[in-house]
Image (cartoon, grey):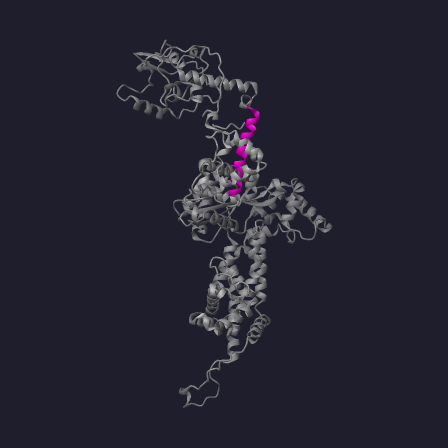
């Protein structure tokens, strides 16, 4: 696959500089070269130090910032600073500006500079006095063959002056450089670069690698060129317009190297970040942070912003701002990193309304945690919310680990999963595939239990078949016998049904908390509802229901043909009169399972009461009264604690009017029966704009986040981007690729409606292919 045929020969290559100038009449003529004079060196240099003295002078004066940007800064003072030259004081003279429109003066450096050589210099030495260090030898400044005259007759100055005047001519005529080039060629150049941006955007959006071992057109036929060149070559073959544009390109301006790819990726990430900041605007936002280490040991800190997007009908949005990294893992370094990334993106840290992290002491510490240090640095109260998803996970882990029988049950489930995963066993299994148990995600436990209960007959049939066929080998048959014996007991089936009942009640809150638009009050409300349902399980009817299911499933199993071991009496009891039977009876098993049932339910309810204490706080009460179903709907005194976080004033009259207005709208059922804070803000935000304090309260209520699920979702993109074969990329490129892949909707806009912005930013630097 060689596409060198698309390119023209090198004889048609454009010059390395994109700036073409026409000859203009200068106010002076070049003179023959003149030998250098020691007085032309900047002040501070001497014959012993030579270039080193000039370097020192350049280092001292490079911070001059009072020179002209678009035009020379010809400062005229009543009296200029004087210096001693040959026993006499000499100073800059404003009359030197006459016939020297290029000359400018720096008050800070007390030196003269050449404006055109600073702006359009292409060959002057970096220690030239008029370019970097500044000229201040006032004694010889106006002499012939020295000072100003020597500089303005130099070849470098004449070239820079010509380019400066050519630029002024184009600006004054209102014409871009496109008037000097062929308009059709400019369009072809833009179409070609636009196609490159489309290819890169498609690959990064779908988390695909770009490069192979080679990144040049000339090496396409050798293989290993990567997806970028392969997809670009395919696009050229399918698009006649692009193929025609490629034929006009010089060979040294194909823009397929990895440096151009990285530059375009950086531009796309820059545009996406600016779009996120623009969406946030002046709104307050919730900060969500979570971290993970990649296979190279680098710490990746996902920073997500939650806010109310006023430009999109006041919809709640969560955006991945960046994936940062820190050399040290302490709380202070992490806090500084977060603030630095916010400032770098252009977000105001003082607009943080709340912060959501996991429960690690590094983040949640009340004395030295990130949440505390952030409040101290910003000198404001920023409520910390422990991620509700993490709390649900801890509820399940702690409650289930409280009973050894439940832990043994999950160990058997894990052994069953590993056994059915073996290739020699998997070919015989006809049921639904078992799920792997994950310590980090308890949802895998629910999926595993559901599969076992729904496919219990297929699993027992498989184990029975393996046990009866000697061709499977003794190890597989012995393992099958052991697993079949474990899962056939009523206690195993009882625990399976019990765990399924408990986890099924916690699954709806978990799914809701994974959603982007779930706010804190909604999350706490559904968790509270799940706890109420859990409390209802603690009754005789609940236990009987689970016990009957387990017994029915156990009785449905085929009876074992193996004779039971004959029970013998205890010889130690021969000399005693035994009035009761010895050994475990059926009712003893039921009693133990009943204790296990109530103990497990009590553990779950107790953990939920302990961990979800926000429902008793003033913050939760303030969020509750913003719910249209509340009896204290829009009570200003209760809402005051939220408004105080942003020092927003409360107008009691506005709250009273808004309460009556919204209740009348609800009674008329113009918006349906399902009234929520989100619905009110999206449907009636125009009416609420006349009541700014009420509008602010509703916006704050939806801005409070409930979980860091979006941060964890970004780690999935990180895992796909930072694959085994892409471990050599730097963190900057990795972070940009993760952001572009995660924010796919914004990345897609970079290749459609924001394409012109990307092209113009790409064209800012000097390019061999002129685009505009």
Q: What percent of the width, then of the height, locates residue 524?
A: 56, 55
Q: Residue furthest top?
A: 144
Prevailing SS of the magenta stretch: helix
Q: Which residues are magenta?
A: 182-203
- Please name the residue shown 49% across and 14% down the image: 24
Residue 710 in the magenta stretch? The answer is no
Percent x, y for residue 586? Answer: 52, 79
**Residue ranking furthest to the left:** 48
Is residue 522 in sight in this rendering?
Answer: yes
Residue 642 is situated, as x and y percent measured from the top left of the image, at 56, 47
579 in relation to 118, above or below: below
Tell me: residue 402, above or below residue 14: below
In this rendering, does residue 352 appear at all? Answer: no
Name the foreground residue: 127 vs 158: 158
Is residue 199 found inside the magenta-colored segment of the image?
yes
Q: Residue at x 58, y 33 (%)?
A: 241
Q: Which is nearer the eye, 203 or 702? A: 203
């Amino acid at each position: 696959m060689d596409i060198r045929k698309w390119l023209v020969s090198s004889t048609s290559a454009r010059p390395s500089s994109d700036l073409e100038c026409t000859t203009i009449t200068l106010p002076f003529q070049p003179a023959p070269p003149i030998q250098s004079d020691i007085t032309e060196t900047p002040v501070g240099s001497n014959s012993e130090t030579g270039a080193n003295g000039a370097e020192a002078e350049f280092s001292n004066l490079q911070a001059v910032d009072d020179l002209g940007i678009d035009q020379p800064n010809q400062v005229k003072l009543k009296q200029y600073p004087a210096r001693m030259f040959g026993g006499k004081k000499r100073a800059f003279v404003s009359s030197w500006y006459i016939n020297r429109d290029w000359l400018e003066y720096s008050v800070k450096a007390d030196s003269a500079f050449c404006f055109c050589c600073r702006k359009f210099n292409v060959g002057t030495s970096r220690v030239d006095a008029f370019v970097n260090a500044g000229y201040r030898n006032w004694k010889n400044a106006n002499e012939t063959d020295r000072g100003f005259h020597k500089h303005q007759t130099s070849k470098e100055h004449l070239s820079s002056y010509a380019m400066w005047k050519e630029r002024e001519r184009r600006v004054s005529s209102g014409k871009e450089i496109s008037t000097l080039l062929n308009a059709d060629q400019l369009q072809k150049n833009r179409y070609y670069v636009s196609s490159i941006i489309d290819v890169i955007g498609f690959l990064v959006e779908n988390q695909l690698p770009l490069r192979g071992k080679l990144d040049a057109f000339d090496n396409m036929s050798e293989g290993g060129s990567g997806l970028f060149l392969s997809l670009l070559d395919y696009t050229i073959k399918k698009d006649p317009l692009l193929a025609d544009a490629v034929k006009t390109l010089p060979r040294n301006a194909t823009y397929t190297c990895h440096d151009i790819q990285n530059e375009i990726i950086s531009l796309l990430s820059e545009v996406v970040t600016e779009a996120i900041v623009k969406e946030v605007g002046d709104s307050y936002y919730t900060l969500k942070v979570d971290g993970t280490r990649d296979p190279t040991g680098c710490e990746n800190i996902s920073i997500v912003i939650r806010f109310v997007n006023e430009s999109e009908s006041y919809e709640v949005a969560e955006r991945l701002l960046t994936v940062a990294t820190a050399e040290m893992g302490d709380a202070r370094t992490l806090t500084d990193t977060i603030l630095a990334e916010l400032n770098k993106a252009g977000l105001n840290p003082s607009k943080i309304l709340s912060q959501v992290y996991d429960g690690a002491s590094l983040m949640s510490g009340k004395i030295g945690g990130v949440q505390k240090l952030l409040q101290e640095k910003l000198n404001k109260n920023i409520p910390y919310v422990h991620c509700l998803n993490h709390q649900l996970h801890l509820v399940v882990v702690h409650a289930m680990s409280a009973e050894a029988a439940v832990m043994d049950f999950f160990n058997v489930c894990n052994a069953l999963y590993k056994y059915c995963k073996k290739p020699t066993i998997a070919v015989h299994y006809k049921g639904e595939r078992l799920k792997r148990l994950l310590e980090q995600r308890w949802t895998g436990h629910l999926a595993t239990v559901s599969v076992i209960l729904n496919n219990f007959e297929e699993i027992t049939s498989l184990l029975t078949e393996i046990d009866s066929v000697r061709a499977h080998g003794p190890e597989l048959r012995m393992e099958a016998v052991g697993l079949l014996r474990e899962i056939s007991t009523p206690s195993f089936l009882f625990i399976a049904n019990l765990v399924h009942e408990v986890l099924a009640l916690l699954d709806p809150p978990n799914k809701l908390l994974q959603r982007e638009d779930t706010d804190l009050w909604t999350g706490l409300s559904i968790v509270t509802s799940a706890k109420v349902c859990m409390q209802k399980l603690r009754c005789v009817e609940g236990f009987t229901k689970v016990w009957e299911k387990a017994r029915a499933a156990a009785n449905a199993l085929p009876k074992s043909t193996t004779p039971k071991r004959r029970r013998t009496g205890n010889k130690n009891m021969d000399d005693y009169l035994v009035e009761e039977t010895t050994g475990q009876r059926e009712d003893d098993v039921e009693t133990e399972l009943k204790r296990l049932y109530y103990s497990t339910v009590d553990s779950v309810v107790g953990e939920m009461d302990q961990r979800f204490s926000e429902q008793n706080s003033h913050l939760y009460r303030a969020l509750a009264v913003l719910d249209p179903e509340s009896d204290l709907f829009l009570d200003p005194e209760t809402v005051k604690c939220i408004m105080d976080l942003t020092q927003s004033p409360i107008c009691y009259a506005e709250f009273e009017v808004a309460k009556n207005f919204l209740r009348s709208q609800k009674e008329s059922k113009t918006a349906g029966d399902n009234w929520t804070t989100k619905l009110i803000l999206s449907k009636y935000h125009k009416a609420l704009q006349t009541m700014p304090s009420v509008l602010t309260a509703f916006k704050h209520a939806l801005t409070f986040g409930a979980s860091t699920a979006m941060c964890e979702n970004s780690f999935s993109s990180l895992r796909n981007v930072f694959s085994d074969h892409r471990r050599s990329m730097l963190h900057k490129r990795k972070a940009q690729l993760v952001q572009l892949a995660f924010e796919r909707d914004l990345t897609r806009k970079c290749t459609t409606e924001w394409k012109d912005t990307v092209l113009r930013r790409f064209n800012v630097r000097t390019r061999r292919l002129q685009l505009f």
